[in-house]
Image (cartoon, rainbow, N blue to C red):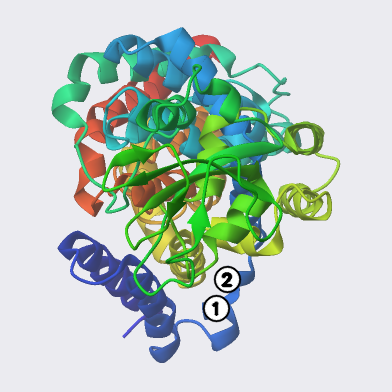
Amino acid sequence: MPESVIALIVLAAAVLLFIWDRLPIAAVALLVPMALWMTGVLDLGEAVAGFGDPTVLFIAALFVVSEALDAAGVTAAVGGFAMRLGGTNPGRLLVTVMAMVAVLTALITPNGSVAALTPVIVVIAIRARRSPSELLLPAAFAAHSGSLLMLIGSPVTVVVADYAESTGAGRLGLFSTALIGLALTAATVGVVLLLGSRLVPRRSSGTMLRDLGEHGPLLAGHYGIEGSGTDLMQRGRGIAEFIVPPRSRFVGDRVHRGMVTESGDLVVVAMQHKGQTVTGPWRLKAGDSLLLQGSWEALNNAAADPDIVAVDDPDAVRRQAVPLGTGAKRALSVLAVMIVLLATGLVPAAVAGLLAALAMVLLRVIRVEQAYAGISWTTIILVGGMMSLSEAMVRSGAAQLLAEGLVSLVGGAGPYALLAGLFVITAVLGQLISNMATALIVIPIGVSAAAQMQISAMPVLVAIAVFAAAALLTPVATPANLMVQEAAGYRFGDYWRLGLPLLVIYGLAGVFAVPMLWPF
């Protein structure tokens, strides 16, 4: 059996398994390279090469950077700003979130912006009493359109610019695709506002999500502490609620307000027995609760003590309740340097991301353990595993065969038919394999077809960039789509409902609007 046929069979099987949704996504992603190796389409090194690909390393580094920004309270500050700007009005909140994602994408690519802003959007959704799933999919799709606002917004546009210059079609400037990007971003926002309530699914991530931003005033009111409670949560110190479990060594200990704990790091602010506040000295009983105040490090250490149970993780409380906390300036400085490196192209994207992640650890914004925990390993495995399928499609000639067949079918009908044909093949492949890999497959074919038809290659190349950005129908189409899947609890079939009308808009923009700006 030809290798191209085997590659197509593995592709179809992977898609069916994703749609079936009975196996873990990571398991399917690991089965793909194993199947390609067992069938001889790829050797073992080629099958697992995706796990060491620079793109995978870049995505992992972005997760670490995102975790550091969240740990430093940067995401809480951004979320607060977005809430003040968008309020609780659903439409205004959607516009604010999507605009924020699109603008950041123009600077650091869809993967970077979605990784950095996913925690922010989750917090915004909770505070607005909405499901994160209502905001995360529109945000991911806004990242796709935002990638066309600037030339550096996506690796695809960078490659297109290189091809345009090398083929003599012309030079694309930093904002050459901005008009198309603005139009598509506006169209994306419009579709979400008009149809989002019917097309965006409400899902649960399976993770308990809470808004801890007003935790200080909440605890102050619960324990009858005078004042607003906002001064209880500060950069260097805060409060946390603990419960004395059965068989704790603290049962029977005498406590009172203002008492310093045996560690010397925490102070007893208040205490309750059976839900009633105790004002005088008291001997602790199982089930009693204590409100302790001290440094965040001391509170975290107390939370790790098996003889006392933290009601809420102090670190999680600090992240939401203390905007721009300790390490925020360092985190923002590292982020700024990373953006400059990505914008200028002084180093490869993976190097910029890894340097930023390393700096976050070395500057003690986060610990190594936090960096590991911040990485979505399901996403990493999925991207790494599916890259083997992209390689197999190229190496076996399956993708080339599909693309050339379609172009030969419609190329003789004129330049608009050529663009329509390129849209179909890019749209189909772009939902199943990496949109970057799809662009690399289709670009040489488009350039060759343009030469044969004696038309300018520039509209063809820009149109391919637009088509490649329309990877909207599946979670495996782009890492940005994958990143929101776990946080929102989306299923494989949740993407196409909103993605399909947007895909049509991208197609119309590429086929008809692009030639108006870059004539044939």
- Asked whether 392 or 32 is in front, the reply is 32
The residue under the point 62% across, 55% down is 261
Describe the element under mark 1 as helix, strand or loop: loop
Residue 393 placement (x, y as % from top left):
44, 66
Callout 2 crowding tier (Cα within 10 Å): few <14, some 14–19, many ≥20: some
Q: Is residue 513 above or below residue 442?
A: above
Seen as rendered, the residue at the extreme right is 346
Q: Position of residue 316 (x, y in %)?
A: 51, 45
Labels 2 and 1 touching (C-beta < 8 A): yes
Q: Which residue is mark 1?
A: 48
Q: Which residue appears farthest toward the left when viewing the image?
A: 198
Q: Is residue 178 left or right of residue 468?
A: right
Q: Quadrant of the N terminus?
A: bottom left
Residue ID for mark 2: 51
The local secondary structure at tag 2 comes to: helix
Q: How many marks?
A: 2
Residue 152's quadrant in the figure? top right
Q: Which of the 4 image quarters holds residue 87?
A: top left
